Image: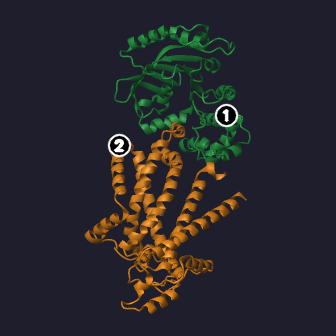
Amino acid sequence: MALFRTILLRLLTTTITLFGVAVIVFVVIRVVPGNPIAMMLPPGATDADIARLQALYGLDKSIPQQFVIWLTGVMHGDFGTSISLRQPVLDLVLGRLPATLELSIFALVIAVVIGGFMALTGTRLRGTRVEAGIDVANGMALSVPDFLWGLILILLFGVLVPIFHISGRISPSIDFPFMTNFYVFESVARGRFDIWADLLAHMFMPALALAIPLAAIIGQLLKQSLKETMHLDYVTLSRTKGYGENHVIVKEALPNAVLPTLTLIGVQFTFLIGGTVIIERLFSYEGLGNMAIDAVVNRDLPLIQGIVILFALIFTVVNLVVDMTYAALNPRLRHA
Amino acid sequence: MTGFLSIRNLSVVLAGTPHRLLRSVSLDLPAGEVHGLVGESGAGKSMIGKAILGILPRAIEIAEGEILLDGQDLLQLPPAERRRLVGKTAALIPQDPLTALNPSRRIGPQITDRLVDILGWKRAQAEARAVELLAEVHIPDAPRVMRSYPHELSGGMRQRILIASAFAAEPKLIVADEPTTALDVTVQKQILRLIAEMQSRHGTAILFVTHDLGVVSKVCRSLSVLYGGKVVEETEVRAFFRGPKHAYSAALLAATPKYTDPDTSLTPVPAEVIAAVQAEVEAADGEWRHVR
């Protein structure tokens, strides 16, 4: 019953959040200068042509009226039609979503692996030069933004030692009848590891660029939290039982030290998803972020609206997942 | 070389400095004996237990001496071997039961882990042993408790569990580091009685670290009085309470509040006694440092 109430409450707050986002975006993109009609018509179009097109897209009505029309459509699962691509927004957005999700999750995995490794190594060798080296590396990784890491990686692994693909999601030569847009998952599920490898070779650099700053944050916070935990009584007690440093760090300290890091990963992961907008552009990766930039350039109002709503939805889902994982890992919250 | 534990001339310093926190401490603990380590805060009583168990803070180093456990000098052993020997033959009853159990692990594995991982028992065997032990420390419904997390249990329960866990591997030596200090008075008595009961059943030697002479009189057979990292008097408990030999011990005994007479005001250890014992410790081995 309590669980049911929690879920209901979550749904309610999520709906309110999404509604707020929708209102803000709807108003802002209509108030800022530049309009889609001007982008569509050739120079020398008459006022009558403009008025006709405006009426066609409903842009002649007031903003509140437009919003009501849009909202009514959304209620029926219709997010409108993209002005520049002339296809339903929902199809476009859902078509691109898997690419961005795969990229973000891959980046998250890389960040957790690198960050976790640095934190554990730094804790194991605390007080030595290795720990100092890790701190320096973390500081550097943090002070350079993800798109700059993208450029650095392109230079390193695309130009100097060209071992990864620098653009796109999949090699054009691969002609495989994918049934879903989750290429990475599908290629594994269908046993096509050659295609899977090609996908990863494309995803690796953009994912790494997104992952580096997050890895540094995870590494720093987790190491700090581990070092504090190492002084606690239960860790000391475990040492008296005959356990060595590695066991004590991984089995006693880590499960407790990971909790504060987890909350942070949730927050930072939403930033990472935001970062895909620029990174996808940089690597010509055909995801939502890349589509978002095109939509803004073309003043494709319905498409912008749809993408932003989807991003907002992803953020709330990520937060929900973090909260649930936190409760699952922390026995003190499990029965609360 | 008499008992299971034998400490010879143990000196401990603040790493990289000549400041000695323990000054040539020697101690023999016959098998099955309960020995009290008493002294004020900072006298170094906990330090002895930590040195034996190998859990001194990183900033503290052993400068000289021998710690013989079962005839083997711990300080000569490679770290991994030392840890295993300590894990097999010694155990700790910690001070604060609220922080000494891992909050994210269930109780059962926290009792059985040493038996399985260090002593090589089968899991089922270790679990059966844990159930037995929990019964010995008067915890009913052992299976349920073993599935619980620490936060679901009271402080007294958790201290009972830690005592059970300390006796699990039938160690020859237990270091009890102020095991009742963090508990409230009513629970203190029960826990003290429980430790005494478990001790006589298992015949374990216990090094009982405490600042409470009342506790010493109840559970210990012999005791050492420490001041400034030095043992100033080592004697039998009965002889001690009849009349301590050292002036500082006498003053410490006089300073113990009498529960029978709540109206007497607290007597501090007189300043001249402190000055004298400081001078004595200083004369014994050079420079004196205020450790408090």
Residue B271 pos. (x, y %): 48, 10
* A267 vs B76: above or below: below
Quadrant of residue A23 within the rendered picture: bottom right
> On the picture, is B147 further left or further right than A89?
right
Kindly report the distance in space between the C-alpha atoms of the residues bearing marks 1 and 2.
40 Å
* A300 vs A53: above or below: above
Quadrant of residue A71 within the rendered picture: bottom right
Residue shown at 57%/37% (left/top)?
B100
For chain B, what colour was chosen? green
> On the picture, is A334 further left or further right than A114?
right
Q: Which of A108 and B268 is in front in this view?
A: B268
For chain A, what colour was chosen? orange
Residue B139 pos. (x, y %): 71, 37
Residue A217 pos. (x, y %): 42, 54
Q: Nearer the viewer, residue A66 or A205?
A: A66
Is residue B135 in sight in this rendering?
yes
Secondary structure found at label 2: loop
Residue B98 pos. (x, y %): 60, 37
* Residue farthest toward the front in the current orientation of the protein: A47
**Chain name for mark 2:** A
Q: In the rendering, which numbered label is found on residue A128? A: 2
The N terminus of chain A lies in quadrant: bottom right
**Chain name for mark 1:** B
Secondary structure found at label 1: helix
Quadrant of residue B197 within the rendered picture: top right
Residue shown at 66%/27% (left/top)?
B188
Residue shown at 49%/30% (left/top)?
B50
Residue identified by numbered label 1: B156
- Residue type, mark 1 in image: Gly
- Residue type, mark 2 in image: Thr
